[in-house]
Image (cartoon, grey):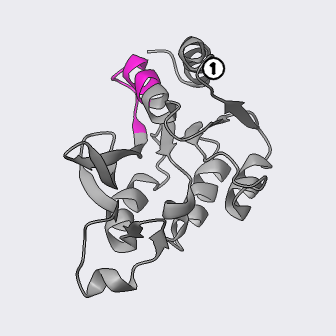
Amino acid sequence: MAGKCLLLTGPPGVGKTTLIMRVFDMLSPSLKIQGFYTQEIRERNERVGFEVVTLDGRKSLLASSTVSSPESMRWPSVGKYKVDIASFESIALPELQVKDDTHLFIIDEVGKMEMFSPSFFPAVLKVLESNIPLLASIPTPKFGGDLPAVARLKNQPGVTVITLNASNRDSMKEHIFHVVSGWLPKH
């Protein structure tokens, strides 16, 4: 069945993660929902990295501007951040395993840091192919172009992209909840 993938995009800081987590909180606790979100790591009011958090609260490092180990020197960089692929994969990939009893996947986000994992995007495509509903966030295209994997994701059958901005983000919560809950079994 097509039409079970909702991708949220918008500029950094517009509230994509907040909106996804508000929708998640509105859904029935009896539903089996898998996935993760990313959140900032802050020290003294400065962003120093990002961590991946599973929907049941387990955390692992995604990227950091303060880690300096011999190992981290080999990590890929995005701006000032070094991306810890092994740490990301250890927590994110198990969450993307397709299981028969899963009602919904949440992936925040399908972005540049996450794409350094060679296993991540194939896992995202498996989720899409499973026909289990997916609510995910994607970055806004930089300099007029999407990341190749993001462009591919947006062009999959049944994908709807919603662009959030400061004036529509609050009003979109009910709409997104309505769409997502329409895909799910009634409890």
Q: Compared to 152, does 135 lie above or below?
A: above
Q: Compared to 44, does 25 lie above or below?
A: above
Q: Residue at x 33, y 39 (%)?
A: 55
Q: Residue at x 77, y 38 (%)?
A: 158
Answer with left or right where residue 94 lies relative to residue 137: left
Total marks in image? 1
The verdict on residue 92 being magenta is: no
In the figure, residue 75 lies in which quadrant? bottom left
Residue type, label 1: Val
Q: Nearer the viewer, residue 74 or 55?
A: 74
Q: Which residue is tagged 1?
A: 179
Return the x and y of residue 115 as percentages of the image width and height: 55, 65
Quadrant of the frame with the N terminus = top right
**Tag 1's secondary structure?**
helix
Return the x and y of residue 32 as percentages of the image width and height: 40, 34
Answer with left or right where residue 133 lies relative to residue 162: left
Answer with left or right where residue 178 lies relative to residue 157: left
Return the x and y of residue 118 as percentages of the image width and height: 54, 74
Near mark 1 (Cα within 10 A), the count class, few <14, some 14-19 or many ≥20, is some
Q: Residue at x 60, y 17 (%)?
A: 172
Return the x and y of residue 146 as percentages of the image width and height: 73, 55
Which residue, as the protein is rendered here, is positioned at the far left? Answer: 44
Q: Compared to 22, does 8 lie above or below?
A: below
The verdict on residue 28 being magenta is: yes
Q: Residue at x 80, y 49 (%)?
A: 155
User: For the magenta stretch, what is the residue range?
Assistant: 21-33
Quadrant of the frame with the C terminus = top left
Q: Compared to 163, does 42 lie above or below?
A: below
